[in-house]
Amino acid sequence: MKDFFFYTDQMTVGYNGKPLIREIKIELNRGEILTLIGPNGAGKSTILKSITRQLKLIGGSACLDLRDMQQMSGKEIARRLAVVLTERMKPELMTCEDVVSTGRYPYTGNLGILGPEDKEKVRQAMELVHALDLKDRDFTAISDGQKQRILLARAICQEPEMIVLDEPTSFLDVKHKLEFLTILKKMVRESKAAVIMSLHELDLAQKISDQVMCVKGKWIQKCGSPEEIFTSDYICKLYDMTAGSYNAAFGCMELPAPLGEPEVFIIAGGGTGIPVYRKLQREGIPFATGILHKNDVDYEAAIHLATQIIAEEAFEPIRPETYQRALERMRRCREVICCLKEFGTWNEANERLWEEARKEK
Amino acid sequence: MKREKHASGRYWISFLALFLLLCILFVWSINSGSVAMSLPDIIKIIFRREGEATAYNIIWQIRLPRVLAAVILGGALSVSGFLLQTFFHNPIAGPFVLGISSGAKLVVALTMICFLSRGITVSAMMMVLAAFFGSMISMGFVLVVSRKVRRMSMLVICGVMISYICSAITDFVVTFADDSNIVNLHNWSMGSFSGMTWSNVLVMTVIVFISVITVFFMSKPIGAYQLGEVYAQNLGVNIKAFRAALILLSSILSACVTAFAGPVSFVGIAVPHLVKNVLKTSKPILVIPACFLGGAVFCLFCDLIARTLFAPTELSISSVTALFGAPVVILIMIRRQKER
């Protein structure tokens, strides 16, 4: 019945025998990526450490390939499971190739001398992460992005069936975050390894994961596909956000909307409003916007940024009542900005609104 | 591929150079002293075991055991230092600065006074055991401290303090001991390779040989451990057993040195550092044998200076090793600071 490659059953984790998170259930197939998200200190690392056997399980079990991991020898684990950690290390006088080579440890003899096959595996792993040119560089002298790639290569040449990564993108800039995750995804597709990792970047977690697990409190809050998890309400709840909100449509965080009576009215639509909304929000000026159809991209942004929205149902012509509401709202604002240059047939109400505004000036 | 050849060339040359240096210093050491001898004489005495009686005795009873002791103990000290640096992930860890040598010194002094005052002679093996016991006590302290402090400089400062405490107690004990051996004890507690007997050399050879071979066969887990504990554990290293083995081996090696030659400073830090920089790698499989050779060369050289510079007065070996070793430590500290 249980044909998952990696699964945990009633797994309870914690430090020094004190349970932190109880009854964790993970079910993961080969070639799938599971991402743990949640606030700092919620226990993401604790779960990962328990899976890699750095911490003893307090209850339940974790099974890899239908076998209880606690019964496996250190050597067997080494051939099946690899880790990539955030902890910054400073190995002395080791070239990148030396660092990657340590991944071959479970396969070499008593003195750890690399054979031709091992050397080839090391080369392939470095090629996969586009780091062949770093081969002879001193590990401590390369950038953080390069270091993470080297550590991934190290994990790859360990030929694992599962890789555990603890916040692998934390110290990287945007370019290197994307690059790292692209390589990871490619590697997972090719090697069919199962991946469990923790990420801080919700937008990236949403895009790369097959499953997302939300860690907070004593039990796992929620586990499911990215589509199930990344809704505005749920993310706000997960992170106890009191200021700002999560914009599910854009997959990004928004700062809180300025409070107070709207001072500016913005006529917008089709994405033209977003830059103006953001500028006003930065300057802390409360504003109202309209008339937006509910399927307009401006509408998605306005939900999080505007104090008031005058909206019309999607795919409907603008009704006179809506126009009236907008007009009243606009008259109470001290300024009107029109972002639209052209008005379509279904949008002629906005054109009238703008003419009205100009007349009153 | 090109670099690989380049690197292995460097390894060969380094090892060859160390070995040559060792040979030259070995011959030079035997050759120098208050009684001058010609090379052919020495060769005759050593290999054909014939020659004039005084010269024969000087070579066989005094110089040869001393020179061999310097080689073996020097190697042991530097390997012990390398193990401690690996264990603490700290480039300035060593048996002397962490107070392990001083702990051994204290217990050895106590044992000697205790036994000698009752007229019991202390065998070489007993000395080593006493020194090992003392090393483990200091090591225990250092381990407790290392759990509390994360900064490498703090660890070393604590080690130096432990070392002062132990030395102070040793001085008390030596002052109040009324024995004709006190002069001997005093000399020993300053560190010296003089007065080695063949039985001493035999005991230290066996202990050091077994320990260093064991260390060499641990080079694979040591290599994995250099990346950090978690990675090592993930690679299948049994961390608890491995850490215990590192502690035991480094203590045995430094205890052996202290038992026979007293505390010898800075060799444990300076030599591994120099060796790594010459080889331009920290791969244990190369560094361990090179450390042994390097330590032997370093101690032979320092001993040569200690006994010839102001002959017939002999300097303590620690003052000479400190002269050459301490600047290296300062250099490491400055370099570390720059990296931040």
Image (cartoon, helix red, strand yellow):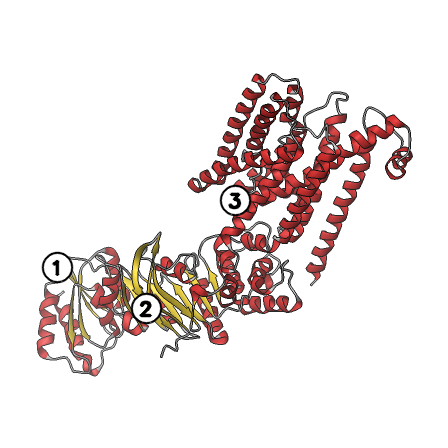
Across and down, in percent, residue B285 comes to 65, 53
**What chain does badge 1 belong to?**
A
- The kind of residue tagged 3 is Phe
Q: Are marks 1 and 2 on the same chain?
A: yes
Is A71 placed above or below B61 here? below
Across and down, in percent, residue B299 comes to 70, 35
If you read the primary sequence from the N terminus, does the residue marked by circle 1 or circle 2 appear first? 2
Cα gap from disc 1 to disc 2, whole angstroms: 48 Å
- Image quarter where the N terminus of chain B lies is bottom right
- The kind of residue tagged 2 is Lys
Front-lying residue, B52 or A271: B52
Which disc number belongs to residue B247? Answer: none
Q: Which residue is mark 1?
A: A261
Characterize the local packing of mark 1: few (<14), some (14-19) or many (20 or more) Cα atoms within 10 angstroms.
some
- Label 1 sits on a secondary structure element that is loop
- Name the residue at 62% across, 26% down: B189
Q: Which residue is mark 2?
A: A25
Front-lying residue, B10 or A318: B10
Across and down, in percent, residue B217 comes to 63, 53
Which disc number belongs to residue B88? Answer: 3
- Label 2 sits on a secondary structure element that is loop
Characterize the local packing of mark 3: few (<14), some (14-19) or many (20 or more) Cα atoms within 10 angstroms.
some
Q: Answer left or right for B103 relative to A38.
A: right
**What chain does badge 3 belong to?**
B
